[in-house]
Image (spheres, rainbow, N blue to C red):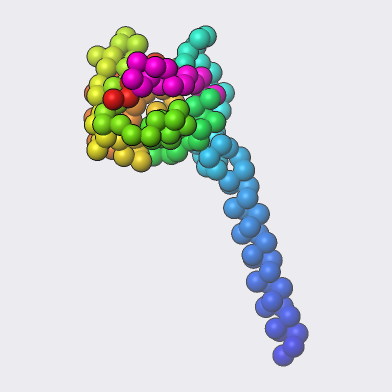
Amino acid sequence: MRRRVTYIVLAVVLLAVAGVAWYLQSTMNSPGGLAAQGNRLAGITSPPGYKVTVVENGRTRASYTLAGLEAIGVKHVVVQGQPQDGPTLLSVLAKAGVKHFTAVDVVGEGVRDSGKMTLTRAQVVPDVVLAVAQRGTVKIAGPDIPQDQRIRDVIRLVVR
């Protein structure tokens, strides 16, 4: 009887160790703790000089390279069936020191879209991200932003 209890305890300990090892491996492989997103973003580089600038009251609050945006944190969301990975708009604004806002103008280079859209504070939910594109730029993506209205190659966030 004692031997059986020892084997059961040993099996439980081994399973716990294996579970912890699996968890640590999956969380340590990428920024933000998601191994899958790290693999999707690995090797993406930005065009020379690309950055996203946060402007509030006519004053530049911060400018971020792609690496700087990824350092803020990367969130994985699925928007209209497509995976999107990048920092949340809320986290980028907070890192830039923005405390309160009523709207954000998202401004892009305007090459493949209108180049500008305005999101109200109510539209800036936790799942709105600056998704990293294969070109090494970011686009705005979120559950309530239709794909045909997304702004690609975002270069400026104007906070109101």
Residue 107 vertical position relative to residue 23 in the rendered view, above or below: above
Quadrant of the rendering where the C terminus is positioned: top left
Q: Which residues are magenta?
A: 52-67
Residue 80 point in image, percent of width and height: 29, 36
- Nearer the observer, 147 or 153: 153
Q: Is residue 80 visible?
A: no
Horizontally, residue 28 falls left or right of residue 82, namely right
- Nearer the observer, 31 or 26: 31
Q: Residue at x 58, y 37 (%)?
A: 30
Q: Residue at x 39, y 39 (%)?
A: 77
Prevalent SS, magenta region: strand
Residue 126 point in image, percent of width and height: 36, 41
Residue 78 vertical position relative to residue 112 in the rendered view, above or below: below
**Which quadrant would residue 35 be assigned to in this image?**
top right
Q: Is residue 121 visible?
A: yes
Q: Is residue 7 magenta?
A: no
Q: Residue at x 51, y 16 (%)?
A: 46
Residue extending farthest to the bottom is 1
Q: How many marks?
A: 0
- Nearer the observer, 72 or 54: 54
Horizontally, residue 82 falls left or right of residue 145, namely right
Residue 98 point in image, percent of width and height: 39, 30
Quadrant of the rendering where the N terminus is positioned: bottom right
Residue 69 point in image, percent of width and height: 49, 27
Q: Residue at x 50, y 9 (%)?
A: 49
